[in-house]
Amino acid sequence: MASNFDTLSDNAKRFIAIAKKDGSDVEFHTIITSVDQSGGAKGFESIATQSGGRLKNFRPQEDIELTLEGYAVEVGTKTGTTGNGFEDLLDDSLSASAGTDPLSVTGTHDRPEYRLILVKTADWTRTTAIAASNSAEKAVRWTYKNGHITNVVHSDTDNVVKFTITYKVAPYAKDGTSNITKESADGTRLLKAVAAYT
């Protein structure tokens, strides 16, 4: 039987996976503390007519930005599917020589495409954002693809190093197909496993 909840609050577990195109999904929920979305409005302006009426002039849908905040003690993720840092998401240049050399990220002109997946669920047995749901799970999943990490900044305001990561995505691809999918599972309808991002 699915868990009975009316809000996605402290009763829900969160998952965040980020994948570079043609790469593997890396889970960041253990070091991310908040996610906020802005943009995406489908706005319009009205034009007054001689009769006192109004004509609607629709505007293109706005781009969407996700702002993530988190904490890390490394500049990136060398191997594996658990995220250890954020700097390599912006510059995509992580290197680690053999021996005692440090992990290193340098500035690049690269703009890799990323997919970002958010999941909130009452199923505390789930371990990844990309897994299928089970028959006892209520869950909501947001998938954003073909976007870019546009900024990674750090601050030390409260004597603890915090990172702010900005991910930006257009609502549609060049061919007009959607870059964003929103899904929910109610214990009967299930989330399917997410395929590789290619």
Image: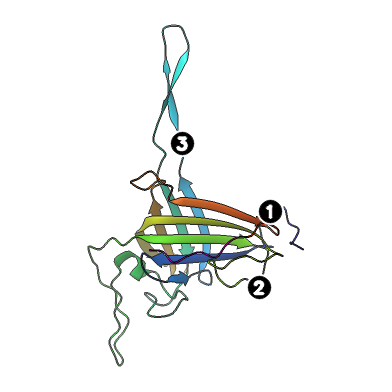
| Mark in front: 1 vs 2 | 2
Secondary structure, mark 1, is loop
Front-most of residues 43 and 126: 126
Q: Mark 3 points at which residue?
A: 42
The residue type indicated by label 1 comes to Thr
Q: Quadrant of residue 189?
A: bottom right
Q: Mark 1 points at which residue?
A: 7
Q: Name the residue under label 2.
A: 125
- The CA span between labels 2 and 3 is 37 Å
The residue type indicated by label 3 comes to Lys
Q: Which percent across, then down, holds residue 92?
A: 30, 69
Determine the residue positioned at 53% across, 72% down.
Answer: 30
Left or right of 192 in this view: 72: left
Q: Which percent across, then down, holds residue 2?
A: 74, 61
Q: Are marks 3 and 1 in contact (CB under 8 Å)?
A: no
- In this orientation, does residue 116 appear? yes
